[in-house]
Amino acid sequence: MGRTHGQKSNNKASLPQVPKNLKTDGQDVEYSAELADQADLEAQARANAANQRVKNRK
């Protein structure tokens, strides 16, 4: 018989992997338009286009 056979563990939902106060929104706050190169501008344009596609889907 396995260790958890016949037992239910209900504490998984109460233990998040990352606390809410450590989660970020995924946006880089150190971006500077003066220091951006062509690759940065292209990446920003792709991100904006992706955001528009997501908004149009809803």
Image: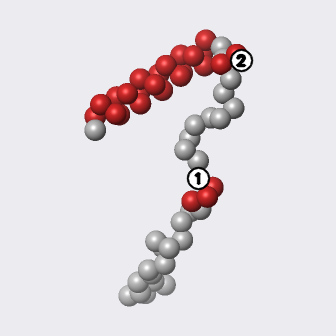
- Compared across the picture, whether 24 is left or right of 51 comes to right
Image point (54%, 21%), residue name: 43
Which of these two is toward me, 1 or 54?
54
Quarter of the image with the N terminus is bottom left
Asked where in the image residue 4 lies, by quadrant, the reply is: bottom left
Image point (69%, 32%), residue name: 30
Q: Which residue is mark 2?
A: 35
Residue 41, how many percent across, how many down? 57, 16
Image point (58%, 37%), residue name: 27
**Count the marks: how many?**
2
Quarter of the image with the C terminus is top left
Q: Which residue is mark 1?
A: 23
Q: From what the image shows, is residue 49 above or below residue 55?
A: above
Which of these two is toward me, 11 or 47?
47
Q: From what the image shows, is residue 3 above or below residue 46?
A: below
Q: Is residue 53 visible?
A: yes
Residue 56, how many percent across, how many down? 30, 31
